[in-house]
Amino acid sequence: MSSLLQCHRLTHAAGTKMLFKSLNISINDGDRIGLVGHNGSGKSTLLSILSGSLVADDGDLSTSRHLHLETVEQFISDSLNRLSLISALAIKLPTEDRQFKQYQAEQLLSELGFSSHEFSYLVSDLSGGQQNRLMFARAIINKPNLILFDEPTNHLDLKTLLFFEGFLNNQNASYIIISHDRQFLDAVTDRTLFLRDEKIYNFNLPYTLAKEKLDEEDAMAEERRKEEEKAIKDLSASAKRLALWGKVYDNEKLARKAKNMEKRIEKLEGNKTFVSKGSNLNLSLEVRTSRVNRMLHIENQDILSPGNQPICLFRIKEFFIRPGDRIALLGHNGTGKTTLIKQIIQHYNLDRESDIFKFNPQCDIGYYDQEIDDLDLTATLIEVLRQKCLNGTENEYKTALIKAGFPFGDLDKKVSVLSGGEKARLMFLVIKLNRPNFLILDEPTNHIDIQGKEELETQILEANATVLITSHDRRFVDNIAERYVLIQDGKLTEINDPQWFYDLKKPHVQIAETKKIEREAIDSEEDILERILELESLLAEDKQRKIKFQKPKLQLAWDQELSQLNEKIS
């Protein structure tokens, strides 16, 4: 396996903050690497150094003379917006070959799911998913052997995400992907680099298996550290005792032994097993429980698009949310998920007594919007809490910010200079301090790292929160939700299995727009056996999870369906 690129002793700092020290990384032909780390650990900076757009403070890179590296752009540049789709791609071809190789651009666009009549579309008129496919096409048209991706899954709808999974798995090029989407990483990588503690941890495994291995190593390191600290403590006690005896009895031999012990202690202190500090940012939620029958009830309502000439995006016949419900709102980009959420929030804030969106008087919503637009960019961290939190003293706000991982010296920092992950954690801190009894979270996983997602999952489950979420992160949805509602074909319907949506198939369920769900009749013996195997697999997978992530209601529904199918087959 030939090496494409090697890093030697790479060291880099951002201002006074050290990001990484003396990194040694080798990237080989055929590598499919996931680069993982908490917000602010330096992942994007490392990718910029690898691409050559940034020079490290120290260390160097060596590259194969056969290396052809491309970086997938994060945003479409303004200069491309005025070009047609085909021109924006063809411009990446060498000038002398551009006309001759135009067919390559057309062929690649076809492979990426574009129809020939879309070739003439202006880039500015393309959807977000189409623009992502164009950026990918621009990176691969000249057949690089190493591609760098920085958060390619952010803001992608599930259809485009699954498309990229399939396309990447059929690529011959090596690649490095920064992503916080665990399912995506498992699907497209076979090697994982964790950037933390200013160094790299390398595993030749996809993310989930690599994380398990890293956790095992962390646990063993902690155990060794405890044993070492106990040995140092015991040795220190013995050294003090010998030193005391040497002084009391004027015994030089005992005093010399005590000094030798102190030297050993000093050496042991310097060689203690390193234990990871982890991320300094903590995410936590607190919610209140409610004994009401329903939080929200929507009946016979058309959901209209925003703007001066609204159109009907979909219709809700009946939809209700009860205390303790954990509901995932599913649908492709543009179907109206965020529009529905914004209308719920608008009615909650302005017209809570209407008969259109019926809120229980005890309903108290905590809302997280995916663009984090609700934060005043000119305010400082402490000012945000003063503006948005209902009760609390200045000292309580300062203590809460410090516990959430914001240093005391940063409390007067403006929101405008925070990273996306820091803004997200600040929003969750506001929600925590207000202690709502109903969470509405629109794409909460876009800006937070994997550790933050896992913390959020744990907090929601342990709080027994009532929650309505949208997310393209399938693992987050699978771990949180017990109910699934889908916007499709102009209506909101409830499904009992999100896999139908993940597979991009029309749900094989006959919905009732209420909690009552009936599966379409399965008549053939082959279909029944196939469904039995699917249900058994779903049950086995769910029961293998930690208890807090299991879904007893779904397990019961699957068990009941299994019994019915087994009766039918017999």
Image (cartoon, rainbow, N blue to C red):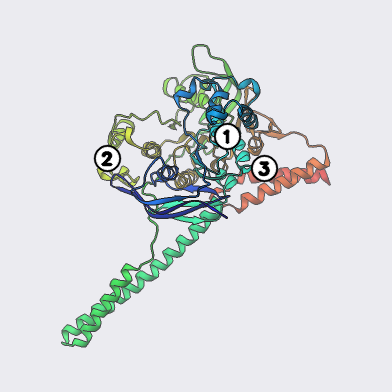
Label 2 residue SS: loop
First-in-chain label (2 vs 1): 1
Name which residue type carries label 3.
Ala
Q: Within the image, what quadrant is residue 312 found in?
A: top right
Place of residue 43 in the rendered image (x, y in percent of width and height, measured from the top left): 43, 45
Tag in front: 2 or 3:
2
Image disc number at residue 141: 1
Place of residue 365 in the rendered image (x, y in percent of width and height, measured from the top left): 44, 31
Name which residue type carries label 2.
Leu
Name which residue type carries label 1.
Ile
Give whichever of 151, 408 is nearer the camera. Answer: 151
Label 1 residue SS: loop
Q: Within the image, what quadrant is residue 101 found in?
A: top right
Give whichever of 294, 279 is nearer the camera. Answer: 279
Q: Is residue 200 rendered to the left or right of residue 473? A: left
- Residue that numbered label 2 is attached to: 411
Using a 10 Å C-alpha cutoff, classify the residue at mark 2 as few (fewer than 14 neighbours), some (14 to 19) or many (20 or more): some
Place of residue 158 in the rendered image (x, y in percent of width and height, measured from the top left): 58, 34
Name the residue: 78% across, 37% down.
522
Residue 546 seen in the current view: no
Name the residue: 58% across, 24% down.
86
Give whichever of 216, 166 is nearer the camera. Answer: 166
Tag in front: 2 or 1:
1
- Residue that numbered label 3 is attached to: 557
